[in-house]
Image (cartoon, helix red, strand yellow):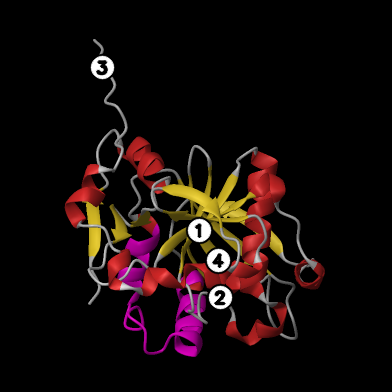
Amino acid sequence: MERKLFTALQGDHAQRLNDALSKQGFRRSQNVLYRPSCAECSACLSARIRVADFEPNRTQRRVLRRNADLRRNATSPWATEDQYALFRRYLDHRHADGGMADMDIFEFAAMIEETPIRSRVIEYSRPAQGDEQGRPLAAVSLTDVFDDGLSMVYSFYDPALLEHSLGTFLILDHVQIAREAGLPYVYLGYWVPGSRKMGYKARFNALEIYKGGQWQDLGSPEDHTAELHPLSVDPIAEQVARIALPEARPMTD
């Protein structure tokens, strides 16, 4: 049974609240911040890459070379028909039975556009092939900009380009964007011990997880299997009491 701790993200202080809670393992979904708070396990661990310490391994360097012809374009959070068409192909191939499988274009637009904080849509286009016109979309990432990094809220890519390892490439490119902007972290969402679906995140070095109220090096993934046990969960009242909220700024005339 899944349980989440969440709060609305709205008003003049939305950006500061998002920055503060994201450092404590929260994630954004439109105008809501949430953090898993299940009663019987604490397996969902927020993960981020330390940009200054990250070095791509041999496989990741090959991914960068394989995608050298992709062109990046960072835009405002505005949904387009081309994005939705790519999103549908991605879902139908990768997550046909997932919770987002029935999203229509209006729900997709809400996911992209309903953001009360600083967000960007980062598009990656590829060279045209055959009778194609222009540069077709290969991948898209909805990305939030924090005071200390970039958060990859949701990404999708062309399933016909599986050999390009675009999921890995998007993370590598976000590390480069953060490095160029002087931002120390790239937030990847949640990593779950023992999950094959989430296992790719552990292949990025300089990875930290939020555990026990602090960020720490991932180390060996096998060291975190205890989070699957019911006794790993703190009472919900203690979890809430430990959340640090941003201080309210005084009103000015």
Label 4 sits on residue: 140
Query: Residue 85 appears at what percent x and percent y?
Result: 48, 78
Tell me where residue 208 sits by quadrant: bottom right
Q: Along the horizontal axis of the image, is 40 left or right of 74?
A: left
Q: Are marks 2 and 3 in contact (CB under 8 Å)?
A: no
Label 1 sits on residue: 47
User: Which of disc 3 and disc 1 is earlier in sequence?
Assistant: 1
Element class at badge 2: helix
Q: Residues within 10 Å of mark 3 (few under 14, many from 20)?
A: few
Indicate whether residue 109 is drawn in magenta.
yes
Q: Are marks 1 and 3 in contact (CB under 8 Å)?
A: no
Q: Are marks 3 and 4 in contact (CB under 8 Å)?
A: no
Element class at badge 4: strand
Q: CA distance from mark 1 to mark 4?
A: 20 Å
Q: CA distance from mark 2 to mark 4?
A: 21 Å
Q: On screen, 173 above or below 101?
A: above
Residue at 44%, 85% (x, y): give it: 95
Name the amino acid, label 1. Ala
